[in-house]
Image (tube, grey):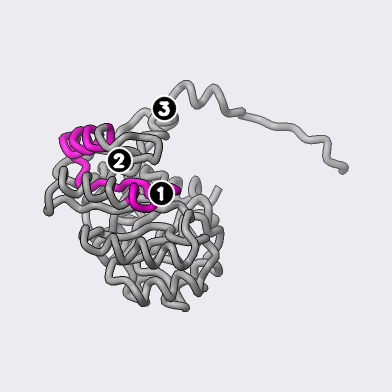
C-alpha cells in the first residue's frame, strides 16, 4: 500500500517517482544477478555473461558458497579471466559461510578486484559482518533479508556493511526505504537495493552517491512496460509514477472488491 500511494502521489504530480524524490541522475548502473547460479557450469556462466553485456547490462554477479571452497575460487577466477579487468564483478554467498570461512575465502577473493562480497554470513550476524568489513579491502554488501529500518540501523551503527542492500517491499515500503537511504548517506555507504528493479531504479536514482541496481527480469510478466538498459545503465522513463502498468494477465489475478463478515 505504501508503494502504491507513492506511485499515486507521483502520478498526481505528473512526475516520474525519481523526479518527485529529487533524482540525482536519469540512469543507474546495473548488474545481472541471475547468470551465475551454483548449479550452472562455468561455461554456462561465461555464455550468460557475454549475452548480458551485449544486452546493455554493465556488470556481472555470480553465486559462491559451494561446499568445495576451492571450486568457488576456480569459478570466480575463470569468470574474471573471461570478462577481463574492466568489467565490474560481484559475488553473492547467500549466507552460506561461517565467520572463519568468510574471512578465509574473502581474503582469497581479494585478487579478483570484486565490487563487493554479498551476504557472506548469516544476515543477522552484525558482529561477524563488522569484523569481516574491517578485515577485507573488498566491500561487504548485505541487508536484503532485513525487514525494518531498525534492523538495518544495527548493521550501519556497527560498521558492518559497506554496500547497503535494502529491499523496499521488505522494509515496509518507500517511506521506510527513504529513511534508510538518509541514514546510509549520512554514514557514507554505497547503496544497491535488492530485487524489484521496477521500484528500485527510482529510489536508487534519488540516492546522492552513485548506486547500483540489480537487473532481474523475473517480474516482466506482471507489467506492460520494460525498463531500458544500455551502456551498462538502467534508464528511467519519463512516464509518471513508477511508470509501470499491470499486464492484462496480472489484472485477472487481482480482485476489485472483497467482502468480509467482520462483526458490526
Ligand atoms: Mg543476494
The kind of secondary structure element at disc 1 is loop
Which image quarter: residue 166? bottom left
Q: Tell me which numbered mark, 3 or 1, is placed earlier along the sequence.
A: 1
Q: Is residue 186 left or right of residue 211?
A: right
Q: Which residue is situated farthest in the right direction here?
A: 263
Q: Is residue 53 left or right of residue 1?
A: left
- What residue is shown with label 1? 68
Q: Tell me which numbered mark, 1 or 2, is placed earlier along the sequence.
A: 1
- What residue is shown with label 3? 221
Please give the label number shown on residue 239: 2
Highlighted magenta segment, given as a residue range? 44-72
Disc 2 residue: CB within 8 Å of ligand 1: no
Eye-nearest disc, 2 or 3: 3
Task: Give x and y (percent) for residue 129.
Answer: 45, 69
Check the image and report above or below for 56 versus 91.
above
Check the image and report above or below for 90 versus 79.
below
The kind of secondary structure element at disc 3 is helix
The residue shown at (24%, 33%) is 43
The C terminus - image quarter = top right
Q: Tell me which numbered mark, 2 or 3, is placed earlier along the sequence.
A: 3
Disc 3/disc 1 C-alpha distance (Å): 36 Å
Looking at the image, which is closer to me, 49 or 24?
49
The kind of secondary structure element at disc 2 is loop
Amino acid at each position: 500500500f505504501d508503494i502504491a500511494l507513492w506511485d499515486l502521489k507521483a502520478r498526481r504530480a505528473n512526475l516520474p517517482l525519481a523526479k518527485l524524490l529529487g533524482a540525482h541522475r536519469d540512469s543507474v548502473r546495473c548488474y545481472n544477478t541471475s547468470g551465475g547460479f551454483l548449479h550452472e557450469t562455468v561455461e554456462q556462466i561465461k555464455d550468460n555473461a557475454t549475452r548480458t553485456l551485449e544486452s546493455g547490462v554493465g556488470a556481472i554477479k555470480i553465486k559462491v558458497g559451494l561446499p568445495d571452497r576451492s571450486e568457488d575460487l576456480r569459478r570466480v577466477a575463470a569468470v574474471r579471466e573471461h570478462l577481463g579487468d574492466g568489467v565490474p564483478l560481484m559475488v553473492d554467498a547467500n549466507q552460506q559461510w561461517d565467520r572463519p570461512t568468510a574471512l578465509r575465502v574473502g581474503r582469497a577473493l581479494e585478487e579478483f578486484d570484486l565490487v563487493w562480497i554479498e551476504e557472506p554470513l548469516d544476515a543477522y550476524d552484525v558482529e561477524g559482518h563488522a569484523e569481516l568489513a574491517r578485515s577485507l579491502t573488498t566491500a561487504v554488501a548485505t541487508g536484503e533479508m532485513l525487514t525494518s529500518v531498525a534492523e538495518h540501523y544495527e548493521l550501519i551503527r556497527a560498521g558492518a556493511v559497506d554496500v547497503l542492500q535494502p529491499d523496499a517491499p521488505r522494509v515496509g515500503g518507500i517511506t521506510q526505504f527513504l529513511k534508510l537511504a538518509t541514514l546510509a548517506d549520512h554514514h557514507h555507504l554505497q547503496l544497491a537495493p535488492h530485487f524489484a528493479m521496477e521500484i528500485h531504479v527510482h529510489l536508487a536514482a534519488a540516492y546522492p552517491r552513485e548506486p547500483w541496481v540489480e537487473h532481474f527480469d523475473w517480474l516482466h510478466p506482471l507489467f506492460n512496460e520494460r525498463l531500458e538498459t544500455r551502456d551498462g545503465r538502467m534508464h528511467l522513463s519519463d512516464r509518471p509514477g513508477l511508470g509501470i502498468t499491470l499486464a492484462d494477465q496480472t489484472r485477472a489475478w487481482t480482485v476489485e472488491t472483497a467482502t468480509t463478515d467482520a462483526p458490526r
